[in-house]
Amino acid sequence: MRLLYSPISPFARKVRVLALEKGLFDLFSLEIVAPFQDETLRSQNPLCKVPALILDDGEIIFDSSVVADYVDSLAEPRLIPAEQPARRRALTFEAAADGMGDASVLVVRERMRPEEERRQDLFERQLRAVNAALDLFEAAVVDGALSGERFEIGEIAVAVQLAYQDVRQVSDWRPGRPALSDWFEVVSKRASMVATYATVT
Ligand SMILES: N[C@@H](CCC(=O)N[C@@H](CS)C(=O)NCC(=O)O)C(=O)O
């Protein structure tokens, strides 16, 4: 299987971390692509985004949640819970984290534009989404819905997007969120997170 990814992409990192946690990383041959520069990616994913996974028979699947679901189906232990309510809760954290990532990518892109060309209203709306998602995660660590004891799809998705906040300096998210900050300190030390760490050069 060929995993098209960029080292900095939190969505691709979610898949890589999941595969490492499951001991399936060797199934992938990794191919770096630059989605904003390389239009040939569009022939594999019409959205021109990473990650995309090309199966051995040529079938292509994309969107990180679909790729993660497929990779999770390949071996036990399942990191996407099968049973309700654990399943919907984990997938809701994944959706919130991915949505925070979508908003963060837009914030980063908007910051690259000259200030006079920025759509301030859209920019602030994305930042509100980022901040509200961060508040949700803080509350979830406090009430134990996001756990330090397990590292399933919800925890993985949140962890990689918090790392992206730091790498791209999207937001100064730690002040006022002590539980989330401590939780992130712990999960960042997992071998899967260390092995997939990348920063902008
Ligand atoms: N919903 C997608 C989001 C993937 C995504 O936005 N990837 C970024 C890299 S971090 C990308 O490829 N962006 C290119 C673009 O938006 O044109 C997923 O979960 O896979």
Image (cartoon, helix red, strand yellow):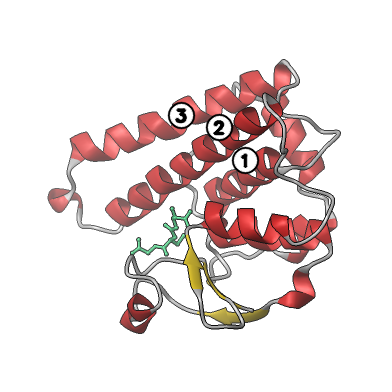
Q: Position of residue 51 (x, y in %)?
A: 51, 66
Using the image, determine if residue 177 lies above or below residue 8.
Answer: above
Q: CA distance from mark 3 to mark 1?
A: 13 Å
Crowding near the residue tagged with mark 3, few <14, some 14–19, many ≥20 C-alpha atoms within 10 Å: some
Amino acid type indicated by mark 3 = Asn
Q: Quadrant of the N terminus?
A: bottom right
Q: Are marks 2 and 1 in contact (CB under 8 Å)?
A: no
Does residue 17 show up?
Answer: no
Mark earlier in primary sequence (2, 3): 2
**Dot in front, 2 or 1:** 2
Badge 1 element: helix
Crowding near the residue tagged with mark 1, few <14, some 14–19, many ≥20 C-alpha atoms within 10 Å: many
Give the labeled residue for mark 1: 158
Amino acid type indicated by mark 1 = Val
Amino acid type indicated by mark 2 = Thr
> Quadrant for ligand 1?
bottom left
Mark earlier in primary sequence (3, 1): 3
**Dot in front, 3 or 1:** 1
Using the image, determine if residue 23 lies above or below residue 69.
Answer: below
The numbered disc on residue 92 is 2
The numbered disc on residue 166 is none
Q: Position of residue 19 (x, y in %)?
A: 74, 62
**Dot in front, 2 or 3:** 2
Give the labeled residue for mark 3: 131
Q: Tell me which corner region of the image, top left, top right, bottom left or bottom right, holds residue 136.
A: top right
The front one of 19 and 138 is 19
- Left or right of 140: which side holds 51? left
